Image (cartoon, grey):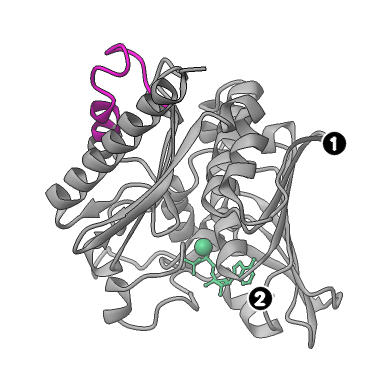
């Protein structure tokens, strides 16, 4: 008799959760990404104790029907890709179909969702279904995660202070707001509103909501394209500097990514304009055929591999350098008064 068995779903989901759900911010990220993918124009995030007590995301997106609401908690269940080809042309933030399954396996979840025709309520605990019934007809989705990591005490132990965990979520929400200026985001912590954006569609307004009006006034727009890539965004005048690269926000096809080489290219474009150890504030949107941008690197979907990287780096370097050169020269020419 062999000794190998297939794991049951709650167990395999819990193992996957180890990679997908590192901390409360990972939950916020996955759930807000789902709300964005559902076409929401207003997304509200309510955290209690930095998300450790509860995380609630309310959106006004497409919602789900009763069957999908249940299926959404199954591993590898997704409405976003249907075959292997789709994997190379991903236009949504999600595609792995494992976030809800992973999150539900390490928390207590209540979901209210409605597509406008029928409403559904689902309750899960530690990956097991507690209740599935008809619910409210408010269009959109309202999902609440209580007691994250209640059944994985070791993970709970590794979390940092509430302030640090909250800091991660604020940072995440700032980037999402910068990347989706046409969506109105609201972040509330323990009843206090921390971030609220208008959803007007103007990036400069979001920059001002996040970094303040005086910084927003010192951000210069840029836009350029090469054969395969299109870039646009805002970058700071050399008089505005920061101590680290956290203020260089990179988005590839709407996804906030971390990419050391690109951030470094932005920094290098400021060579001689900024002291070597200082960094600019930059919002850089990169658009390219999804075929050239592989996000299937890690479950958290924050790393990306790019084809034609040299072409992109040259485009970024030249565009930002030109933008800064022009901007700093402008005031000199205008001075003779
Ligand atoms: P993925 O986003 O990779 O597809 P998830 O586990 O995050 O996987 O979600 C599973 C599915 O549940 C999604 O494909 C989507 O169809 C549905 N879903 C999740 N959240 C929402 C939401 N807020 N609004 C509408 N549908 C949702
Ligand atoms: Mg998702």
Whether residue 273 is in magenta: the answer is yes
Q: Residue 176 or 106: which is nearer the viewer?
A: 176
Residue 163 in percent (x, y) is at 64, 22
Residue on which the image places disc 1: 191
Ligand 1 has an atom within 8 Å of the beta carbon of the residue at disc 1: no
> Is residue 144 visible to us here?
no
Pick out the residue farthest to the bottom.
Answer: 117
Q: Residue at x 58, y 31 (%)?
A: 217
Q: Is residue 266 left or right of residue 127?
A: left
Closer to the eye: label 1 or 2: 1
For the image shown, how many numbered marks are present on the structure? 2
52 lies above or below 296: above
Q: Magenta segment range?
A: 264-280
Whether 261 is drawn above or below 108: the answer is above
Q: Residue at x 39, y 31 (%)?
A: 327
Most common SS among magenta residues: loop
Q: In the displayed structure, does residue 317 sit left or right of residue 153?
A: left
Q: Secondary structure at mark 1?
A: loop
Q: Position of residue 142 (x, y in %)?
A: 75, 62
Taking the magenta stretch, the answer to whether it contains residue 137 is no
SS under mark 2: helix
Which residue is found at the position 37% from the left and 21% from the top? Answer: 279
Seen in the image, is 93 located left or right of residue 59?
left
Question: Which residue is labeled 2 in the image?
Answer: 69
């Amino acid at each position: 008799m062999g000794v190998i068995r297939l794991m049951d779903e709650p167990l395999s989901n819990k193992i996957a959760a180890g990679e997908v759900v590192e901390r409360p911010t990972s939950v916020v990220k996955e759930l807000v990404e789902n709300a964005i993918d559902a076409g929401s124009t207003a997304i509200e995030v309510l955290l209690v104790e930095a998300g450790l007590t509860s995380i609630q995301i309310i959106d006004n997106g497409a919602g789900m029907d009763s069957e999908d609401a249940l299926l959404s908690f199954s591993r590898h269940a997704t409405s976003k890709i249907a075959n292997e080809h789709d994997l190379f042309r991903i236009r949504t933030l999600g595609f792995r179909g494992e976030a809800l399954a992973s999150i539900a396996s390490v928390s207590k979840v209540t979901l209210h969702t409605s597509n406008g025709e029928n409403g559904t309520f689902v309750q899960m605990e530690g990956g097991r279904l507690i209740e599935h019934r008809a619910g409210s007809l408010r269009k959109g989705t309202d999902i609440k995660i209580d007691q994250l990591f209640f059944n994985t005490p070791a993970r709970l132990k590794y979390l940092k202070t509430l302030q640090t965990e909250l800091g991660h979520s604020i940072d995440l929400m700032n980037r999402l707001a910068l990347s989706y200026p046409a969506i109105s985001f609201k972040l509330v912590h323990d009843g206090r509103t921390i971030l609220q954006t208008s959803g007007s569609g103007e990036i400069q307004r979001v920059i001002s909501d996040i970094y303040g009006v005086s910084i927003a006034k010192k951000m210069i727009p840029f836009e350029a394209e090469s054969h395969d890539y299109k870039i646009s965004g805002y970058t700071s005048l050399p008089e505005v500097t920061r101590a680290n690269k956290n203020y260089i926000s990179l988005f590839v096809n709407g996804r906030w990514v971390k990419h050391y080489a690109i951030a470094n290219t932005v920094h290098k474009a400021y060579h001689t304009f900024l002291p070597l150890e200082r960094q600019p504030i930059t919002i850089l949107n990169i658009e390219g055929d999804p075929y050239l941008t592989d996000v299937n690197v890690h479950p958290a979907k924050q790393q990306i591999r790019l084809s034609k990287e040299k072409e992109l780096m040259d485009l970024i370097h030249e565009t930002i350098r030109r933008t800064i050169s022009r901007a700093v020269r402008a005031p000199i020419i205008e001075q003779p008064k």
